[in-house]
Image (cartoon, grey):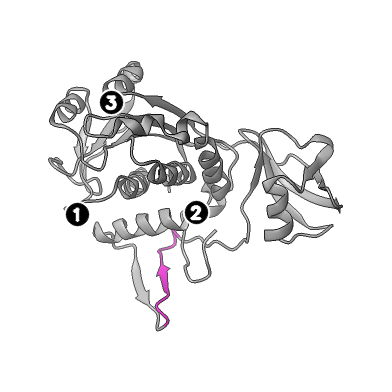
Amino acid sequence: MVSQGMVGSVDAESRGRVGVEAVCTAISHLILSGRSWFMLRISHRLRFRLYLTSDLISCYTKSMNIILFEAYPEDGRIPLSDARGKHIKKILRLQEGDSFLMGLVNGFAGRAVITKIDSEAIAIDWKQETPPLPLFPITLLVAQVRPICMKRILREAVSLGVERIVVSGTDTGERSYRDAKLWKGGEYREYLLSGAQQAGRTVVPELKLFDTLYDAEREYKQEDTGLVRIALDNIKPETKLSTMQIPDGNKYILAVGPERGWSSHEREFLTGSGYLSAGLGDRILRTETACSAGLAILLGRLSLI
């Protein structure tokens, strides 16, 4: 959901909604890359609106996106002790007779009508309406970074619609990140679901962890047919992602390195593995910013958003 101070999205009705952070990051980089699609106007209250050409216009007009469940609530009752029950009652302030968009993870979505609210639960009547919609044929291969940053990366990557997220250790990254509670305790799942709920979609991408970049690439080496590999590099990029000649493919991998960048050995390995080198300009970006900007530009270049 985007606040009223901002207008603009990525075809919200057919492709889903993305977070404010991802939208702002993506639009900023598209503007800086010289796209003529945008006209920026700063209002006297320091709020801004973005005017987009007709093929990009779409506004966030609904106050909620979707509430997901791993399985249908028992007896059609959502406990008020459940975070989703609290959200429906205290944040959305829905009453009996109101409805909200609900879905099952990787399953159908549909409107749920509240039939009763008592002291313990919210009773609903839910109908399956929309089958799960496919994700975009893009894999985000991202280096391990600080858990607080990785949480944002996971959420925004899912909201942008990638079909797979691969997280790997790197030569210059901190090895302790692999042992963070985010991974050990399964907390990462919460952020994947958050991204899907933000987008108003039910499908959650596959996520895999690898100790090294080399292990990750070997896992997917057999997918050579129709797979286009692109690695973002802020040290020795061959071209800009916004203007590079992107080969036709069935699927794509976008690799984003750690805060300290790829090591020289990793850079050679990526080149030898068929990755095309591309950059996002001369400014040094955080990994989380590079992920959102890179994915948005790639999706746009492929006419997927």
N-terminal-most mark, 1 or 3: 3
Q: Secondary structure at mark 2?
A: loop
Q: Position of residue 78 (x, y in %)?
A: 77, 44
- What residue is pinned by disc 3? 213
Q: Position of residue 115 (x, y in %)?
A: 86, 51
Which segment did they paint magenta? 45-56
Considering only vertical position in the picture, is 299 above or below 47?
above
Tag 3: residue type? Leu
Whole-angstrom CA distance, mark 1 to mark 2, is: 29 Å
Marking on residue 283:
1
Tag 2: residue type? Asp
Q: Secondary structure at mark 1?
A: loop
Whole-angstrom CA distance, mark 1 to mark 3, is: 24 Å
Considering only vertical position in the picture, is 301 above or below 72?
below
- What residue is pinned by disc 2? 11
Whole-angstrom CA distance, mark 2 to mark 3, is: 34 Å
